[in-house]
Image (cartoon, rainbow, N blue to C red):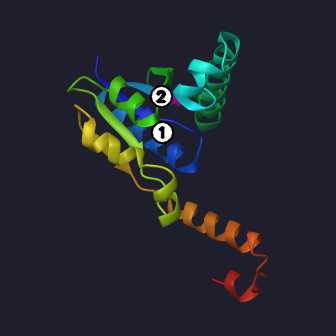
Amino acid sequence: MRRVVVGVSGTPGSLSALHRAAAEARVRGAELWAVMAWQAPGGELGSRSSCNVTALTDCRAAAVERLREVLDGAFGAAGPGVTLAGLTVRATPGAALVDTARRSEDLLVVGTGSRTPLRRLVRPSVARYCLAHAACPVLTVPPSPLQAELEAVHRRNFWRIPLDARELAP
């Protein structure tokens, strides 16, 4: 069976990618695999020294619950219209997606997200990792134009810049 694998984190960008992946799965007659990556507190080094089995079990359970919430919020009771499989993987997001979409007939869908200079320094790009390492085609979904507007509102609120009513007029 063909698969469309998509990375899910709950961000607006990943929700755009999730809906695009569902549309691609319907067109291709494929299964939709939603993958959420998770890591132990402190990363792999932290899990070796300070985390016990209970903490790792709790982290995995939290990831499973978060994935359930995201999928329910994205599709509701109606579902995506295709066979849906949710998968939580203990790994970095890029590695989890590339390892899951390892067959050449798979399609990997990732959101590109907002890539401000500060975010580029702090977090590596999952989309770039997938493009460089995937064994299957990769579809990158740009952020929604509404996401840029939402980020502008957050910046305005953070800096306490007053809203000019003339900006609201069409």
In the image, residue 36 lies in the stretch drawn in magenta: yes
At 46% from the left edge and 60% from the top edge, which residue is drawn? 115
Bounds of the magenta segment: 34-38
Q: Amino acid at mark 1?
A: Leu
Q: Secondary structure at mark 1?
A: helix
Q: Amino acid at mark 2?
A: Ala
**Contact between labelled residues 1 and 2, with CB atoms less than 8 Å apart:** yes
> Nearest the camera: 47 or 64?
47
Quarter assignment of residue 52:
top right
Q: Taking the image as drawn, is residue 40 in sight?
A: yes
- In the rendered view, does 48 fall on the left or right side of 33? right
At 61% from the left edge and 32% from the top edge, which residue is drawn? 42
Question: For the stretch drawn in magenta, what is the main secondary structure?
Answer: strand
Disc 2: which residue: 34
Q: Taking the image as drawn, is residue 30 in sight?
A: no
At 63% from the left edge and 70% from the top edge, which residue is drawn? 152
- In the rendered view, does 132 fall on the left or right side of 124? left
Q: Position of residue 30 (x, y in %)?
A: 33, 25
- In the rendered view, does 53 fall on the left or right side of 38? right
> Nearest the camera: 131 or 22?
131
In the image, residue 28 lies in the stretch drawn in magenta: no
Query: How far is the residue under mark 2 from the one under mark 1?
Result: 8 Å
Disc 1: which residue: 18
Q: Secondary structure at mark 2?
A: strand
